[in-house]
Image (tube, rainbow, N blue to C red):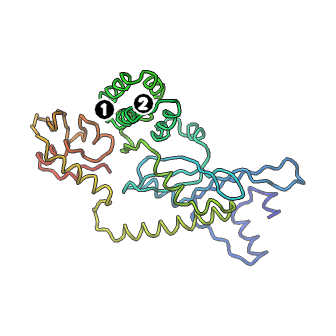
């Protein structure tokens, strides 16, 4: 270790030969592309190193995210529970079935803003509401109006909910108006990610999932999390291998079936050039089957055909499954 410490840029092949010569152990390069960054504090050479922070991301997890997950990453932190206090920060994605996909143990959100300045940043509405309530804006009506505004798929519905809040409490309206709606309202999200998430539940689920390891020392905690993740990925691969080709994940299928039920209440009229007028429950929207857009924006944001879109797709003689976003 002393020789490696003195020569941190030692080539891997040379290091492998040294390990073999000294300990008769064959070192292998597994999971090539993984990243581990360790920061320690050492004010003087004669003082032992003191742990500061660590970043870990396995190449297989990064590859899986790039090849099979939505381009959405949730970042959050939780506290260690044991004798050694600190924070464990994690990045968690969403897989094709809308389930959590842990990516890495990471740094702070400001670092993401520096590395990915053009990425869309969203605020967890649960946390937004907690701060909203702590600021003195309490009551079930204000809570419902906040969530109605956040869940609106169009800016028209968003502004309507905000105006209703203004009638109830102008200070509450002013507090929310200071927050950029593109970070917490579905109607202001871009449509690239195909995700309508307005909360960070996936990361909070992960923090609960690893709860028993958070009371351990750093190395034991990381090893416990690594083994738990390994078992999870094996189970996921087995489930996927057992699925028929072309079949959907059960969560996505359930969402599509719910929209199909809603389509039975829609009335569709063809307007030419692939455009349909769809009326449903007193609302009228335009649907472009070929453009994969709907006036309600739900299809645009989620990538899953809404009830209006399904009505138009069926009228057009298509299969709604074929119009799911890749």
219, above or below 142, in the image: below
Tell me if 173 is positioned left or right of 62 in this view.
left
Q: Residue at x 45, y 34 (%)?
A: 183
Q: Residue at x 40, y 44 (%)?
A: 197
User: In the image shown, does 159 or 235 lie closer to the viewer?
Assistant: 159
Percent from the top left, x then y, of residue 22?
79, 74
Nearer the N terminus, badge 2 or badge 1? 1
Q: Mark 2 = which residue?
A: 181
Q: Residue at x 37, y 67 (%)?
A: 240
Looking at this view, name the residue that lies furthest to the right. 46
Q: Which mark is residue 154?
A: 1
Q: Quadrant of residue 115?
A: top right
User: In the image shown, does 230 or 174 lie closer to the viewer?
Assistant: 174
- Kindly indicate whether the residue at mark 1 contacts the one at mark 2 (C-beta within 8 angstroms): no
44, above or below 7, in the image: above
Taking the image as drawn, is residue 107 in sight? yes
Q: Which mark is residue 127?
A: none
Local secondary structure at mark 1: loop
Tell me if 317 is positioned left or right of 240 in this view.
left
Percent from the top left, x then y, of residue 220?
66, 65
Q: Residue at x 62, y 65 (%)?
A: 223
User: In the image shown, does 6 or 251 lie closer to the viewer?
Assistant: 251
Percent from the top left, x then y, of residue 56?
61, 56
Q: Quadrant of residue 226?
A: bottom right
Tell me if 10 is positioned left or right of 324 in this view.
right
User: In the image shown, does 53 or 323 lie closer to the viewer?
Assistant: 53
Q: Residues within 10 Å of mark 2 (few under 14, many from 20)?
A: some
Taking the image as drawn, is residue 189 in sight? no
Looking at this view, name the residue that lies furthest to the front. 139
Looking at this view, name the residue that lies furthest to the bottom. 24
């Amino acid at each position: 270790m002393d020789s490696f410490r003195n020569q941190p840029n030692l080539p891997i092949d040379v290091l492998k030969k040294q390990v073999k010569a000294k300990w008769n152990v064959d070192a292998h390069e597994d999971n090539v592309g993984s990243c581990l960054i360790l920061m320690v504090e050492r004010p003087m050479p004669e003082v032992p190193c003191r742990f500061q922070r660590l970043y870990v991301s396995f190449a297989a997890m990064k590859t899986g995210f790039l090849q099979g997950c939505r381009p959405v990453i949730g970042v959050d932190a939780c506290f260690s529970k044991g004798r050694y206090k600190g924070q464990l920060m994690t990045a968690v994605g969403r897989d094709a079935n809308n389930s959590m996909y842990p990516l890495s143990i990471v740094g702070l959100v400001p670092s993401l803003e520096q590395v990915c300045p053009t990425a869309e940043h969203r605020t967890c509405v649960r946390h937004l509401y907690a701060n909203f309530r702590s600021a003195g804006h309490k009551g079930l009506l204000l809570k419902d109006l906040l969530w109605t505004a956040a869940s609106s798929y169009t800016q028209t519905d968003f502004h309507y909910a905000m105006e209703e809040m203004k009638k109830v409490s102008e200070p509450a309206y002013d507090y929310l108006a200071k927050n950029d709606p593109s970070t917490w309202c579905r109607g202001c999200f871009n449509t690239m990610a195909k995700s309508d998430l307005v909360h960070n539940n996936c990361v909070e689920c992960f923090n609960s999932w690893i709860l028993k390891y958070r009371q351990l020392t750093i190395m034991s905690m990381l090893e416990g999390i690594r083994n738990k993740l390994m078992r999870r990925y094996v189970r996921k691969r087995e489930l996927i291998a057992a699925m028929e080709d072309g079949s959907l994940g059960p969560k996505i299928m359930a969402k599509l079936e719910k929209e199909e039920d809603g389509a039975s209440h829609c009335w569709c009229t063809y307007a030419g050039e692939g455009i349909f007028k769809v009326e449903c429950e007193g609302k009228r929207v335009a649907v472009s089957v070929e453009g994969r857009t709907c006036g309600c924006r739900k299809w645009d944001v989620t990538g899953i055909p809404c009830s209006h879109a399904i009505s138009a797709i069926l009228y057009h003689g298509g299969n709604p499954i074929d119009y799911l976003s890749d």
